[in-house]
Amino acid sequence: MINENTDPITFEVVRNGLDSLVDEMAITVMRTAYSGVVRDALDYSTAFCAADGQVIAQGLTIMLHLGSFPAAINSLLTKFEGRINVGDVFILNDPYTSGGMHLPDVYIIKPVFADKSLHGFVGVVAHQADMGGLVPGSNSTESVEIYQEGLRIPTLKLYDAGIPNEAIFDFIETNVRLPVQVRGDMRSQLAACDIGERAILDLITHYGAENLNGYYDALLDYSEQRARSEISALPDGVFEFEDFIDAENLEDGPVRIAVKLEIRGDEIFVDLDGSSPQVPAGINAPVPFTYAAVYGAIRLIMDPDIPNAAGYHRPIHISVPEGTVVNPVHPAPVAARGITGFRTMDAVLGALAQAIPDRVPADGEGGNTLISIGGQRTDGSQYALVDFFGGARGGGPTSDGAEGVSHPASNLANSPVEIMEVENPVVVDDYELIQDSGGAGKFRGAQSYVKQITNLGDAATLQLRSDKRKFPPYGLQGGSTGSPSLNILNPGADETLLPTLAQVRLERGGVIRHEMAGGGGWGDPLTRDPTAVLEDVLDGRVSINSAKTEYGVVISEPQNRLDQGATDLLRSTMLQQRESSNS
Amino acid sequence: MNSAKPRASLQLRVGADIGGTFTDLVFLRSDGQYSVRKVSTTMDDFSKGIVDGLTAFLSDEELTPDFVSEIVHGTTIATNAILENKGVRTALVTTKGFRDVLEFRRLRFPDLFSLDYTPPKPLVPRRRRFGVDERMMHDGSIRRPLDETSLDCVLNDLEEAKPDAIAICLLHSYANPDHEQRVTEAVRDRFPDIYVSASIDVLPEIREYERTSTTVINSYIGPIVDSYLKSMRLRLDSENVRVPISIMQSNGGVMSYAAARRTPSRIIESGPAAGVVEAHQLSKRLGLKDVITFDMGGTTAKASLIEDGERNLTTEHEVGAGIQLSSRLVKGRGHALKLPVIDIAEVGAGGGSIVRIDPGGALRVGPESAGADPGPACYRQGGTDATVTDANVVLGYINPTAIAGGTVDVDLEAAREALDRSAAKQLGIDTTDAAYGVYAVANTTMIRAIKSVTTFRGRDPRDFTLMAFGGSGPVHAALIARSLGIRQIIVPGSPGVFSALGLLEALPEYGFSRTLIADPAQVSADVIIDAFDQLESSSLERLKDEALNEAITGSWSRTADLRYRGQAYELTVTADTGPNDDLLGMIVERFHQEHERTYGRRASDEPVDLITIRSTYRIDAERIVPESVNIPQEQQQPRQAYFGREQGWMLTPVITREELTRSFRSGPLIVEEYDSTTLIPPGTDARIDEQGNITMINTDLDANRD
């Protein structure tokens, strides 16, 4: 039974109503947003929170926003205690004063009142196209403190009892490179909040505010109970894993993410102690974001049907030491913290893979690579191209890693090449899978792909955020690692290999070529079904040579037929060699 | 039209709607009378069932084949070929360096919390995707000329790949078709017997994945649809039925046999479209401009919008995506089809939807369905899970002994037992409360479908009339409408053959489009008008080939897709103007208005971009209005029906449709007929109109209507 004071039918009806309202808010944002990051990476989410800030429903479009609302709402509850009125709308983005995640992520939150008492909050956090700072898009990896990263917005009233505070709009528009887009996106956030508010008021009319509060509690308890029953089915134990961010531009070398994960009964304890100290580069992840990454990884091994109510966080206990790259203190820069969120999620999954090896796949491409090119068109107007590369998942216990499917942390979409070329002075010349890039395995990692972009305009600023070169995607259960990522400037005789995090000038005619890391393999490649290897060869995913050396599968040319006898022989020879080298 | 012909009054138009189990045939006479035949669907060759049913009808009625004037056909053959991976062996030619666009899709995945998500297999495997060396730019300029040597290589590769169909889609071909045309000619020359489609013919619009995917779909199903239609033609010819065959398109118009063979991608959602078309026609006759259509069957419920007298179309459809909510947040489950499709939201709630208690103790209904086989527990055809239909039987809404004119037995006890087992016991409530709970939860799921075409788009459902059809729709309609604040509900006559009638009421229309990116503030109106004129004249040439004879006349209507600069989605507005109108000013203003209506805001000071122009040719045709037929029903005794805790069990009269009067009668009432049951709960009044439709009014909304 869900809760003694609630009736199961009304519970389901209210739950459907809440899901529907946060989705409706999310659709409004997606379809009206201007920012490429919002419309293509779905880098935003919508939520309804109870009066105490607990998330009751979240219109989730990106995993890395799980649990990102409470900190923001707590900041406004603290700062404006007793001064929250009908018609107010709050805005914030600052991680150090106000519960934000990084400066481009702007929260707009509207309180909802039942008569005159505060009933809850509807809110939208969306990644704005620009918030000022060092580079267009405000995602520099080169800043050494947050002051360089753009406009910091503490928790403020954007509307005071229904009256817009024009000063805030003015300040923002003056400080960003793309004021039209930013204003448009703020408007779309406001529109979504209005829609959410209306839907909550409808529910209040139908069910009464007090009664609804009972159902919110029931929803929290329900999600908690579902999470606990899933966790108790996992084996108890302590599981450790570490992963690294290349961060070649840092003196102290790779950045370590250390995870100690303990499953005890129906609870999980995650400790990130041992992770690197915060760094003088914009990859520090403010703690709400780190929490989201941990929740996200655990969420991935649970029944997808559990609602996004904060109750399911209750049995998950996270400990993150201050002053680390996963819980930085002021004024550490945080603009490109996405990479750290990805790595944290991958590391937690690596720990979970030891607890439940039959349920967790090998490592993927490590989350999206971000390429931004910003400059001036010939007519003097500014442009900021933001392109995402992602989609090479690791092989799993039952299937090959999916190709062209984004990392689970961030459900991004690509920008159509044709649209990208209409909107920006660039041309894309190569956009294809890379043969043999996926790690071999019983279920192999996804082949990665390449994208090559040429600048047709005046010299521009190129900002690259990538990873997984020194530490390519790991394999599991005997699978091989995937191929490392590469950033090549002006490929050809005079090509330069750029670091994984880079900010350089891209001349007119300059070319940037990014090869994404390939997914890790799962299981022993010598146990892969030879016909699956043959299929890969026929599709040009795996070369005949790799079929032989990695998988022990002999394909006879030129007819491309599987030679079963030669394969059996080769595989047994390879197994013997492996045994003798082990002994 | 020509009264001299004595036979004119006796002509028959035949609608054939293929379903999973039955094929509905409707024979509409020129005087509006119609007859219905249900024949078993012949899975191995659908045309056999249709033609056999038709000839049997003709012989029963002692009519000769020349009484038939046209056959209009709704078919799922195209969709099924994709769902079941049974299309033909297809190859794809792209710009070199871009052959994996089809496979990368948009990278996005629909299952947010799944670690082992596998995307749908591309319809063309990588080994049959070939790149040709060339490159167009978005402004139509040539970056790299077409390399003839590379084209020769591709032709050789194609030869070796032995495809049964070929799709061709080069980058930016919508802006300059020269290279794609050259490649297409070369391919057609070399492979004259292979089905070939080029993106410039199928969908000359920007966005390479969507254009490629749509073109590939066209080729993948092309030969299947082609041979199906040919076989139907041959069968009909052999029975001396030498009349035109028309096919229902996904956008609600019908198209000729020849046009369907060329662009079969336009008939993908042929089936669901017909019901909306019929609802649209009926709305016009009733003088209703704003209607929500609600079609609830065994597995799913579908909602669509008729607004300001027009059907709503979408170009964001995915084929093979399973149940899809319109404008769903996250796409990627199916194959993108960017052609206009009637915008239908679908949810997994139907009469057969299965009831269960989830691990957290909440009552859930669907999306799993017992379907027609094994069916609801109360039919005793092997089903043991409780379903929505079982709940409706327990509540007294559906006849507890037999339905469908006594042809299907109903077992009330089996329904009660199933509900006890599936829900009531775990929840610790009695059977009746559990049944009412199932009814209420199913309603909330269906409400979501309706919301996704209304409130999700800035439309207030209270401004609409609900039109309910399909086997289960009329049982749920009144209370769903009440929850949404909808006052008026229409249940049309013959709800069971509603879709087949839609086939016969649909008008021939042919849509064409072209991407034309322009800044309305900079470009001259003449450029846009010329582009429309050109699109129409070249399209008319093509239509003459495949659809029209000299005698047929029609007219063009124009629309345009616009967006605020930087947005990812366009909105479509009408571009029809008078000769002295300011075309650009008008479409921009209409776009601002549409944006405000849909999303609640406009930005008059922001730049707007025109992206695509569309022209639709509608052929002048007269349509006979079908007159509803009544199948006599037996008198029924009143029975107890349950209406929630407040009202409890009420003795409810069970009547036939004819027993409803022109003046309103208050619920509770149940109208039982051959293929449907209409529930009129307390607080709702009902009457019948001259055309045989049931009108319900939720009178209890009147008190607190604002």
Image: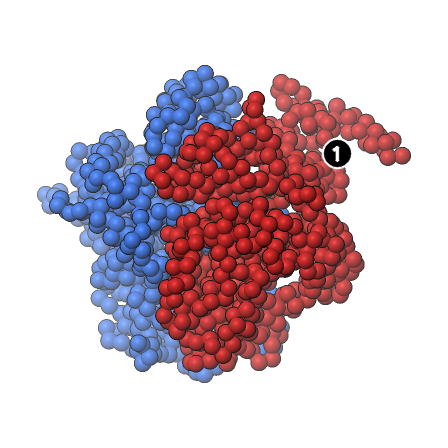
Residue at the far left: name it.
Answer: B4
Q: Nearer the viewer, residue A258 or A563?
A: A258
In percent of width and height, residue A275 lies at 71, 53
Residue at 23 percent of width and 58 percent of height: B284
* Quarter of the figure with residue B512: top left
Q: Nearer the viewer, residue B692 or A84?
A: A84
| Colour chain A is painted in | red
In percent of width and height, residue A160 lies at 40, 71
Above or below, comparing residue B93 to residue B612 in the picture: above
Above or below, comparing residue A373 to residue A436 in the picture: below
Side of B560 relative to A344 (left or right): left
| Colour chain B is painted in | blue
Q: Dot 1, how many residues are within 10 Å of its Cα: few (below 14), some (14-19), or many (20+)?
A: many
Amino acid carrying label 1: it is Leu
Residue at the far right: name it.
Answer: A583
Above or below, comparing residue B213 to residue B475 in the picture: above
SS state under label 1:
helix
Q: Nearer the viewer, residue B163 or B579?
A: B579
Residue at 53 percent of width and 52 percent of height: A149
Residue named by callout 1: A526
Side of B383 relative to A373 (left or right): right
* Visible residue check, residue A500: yes
Quarter occupied by the N terminus of chain A: bottom right
* Visible residue check, residue A536: no
Q: How many marks?
A: 1
Q: Chain of mark 1?
A: A
Quarter occupied by the C terminus of chain A: top right
Residue at 35 percent of width and 47 percent of height: B565
In percent of width and height, residue B474 lies at 38, 66
In percent of width and height, residue B451 lies at 40, 63
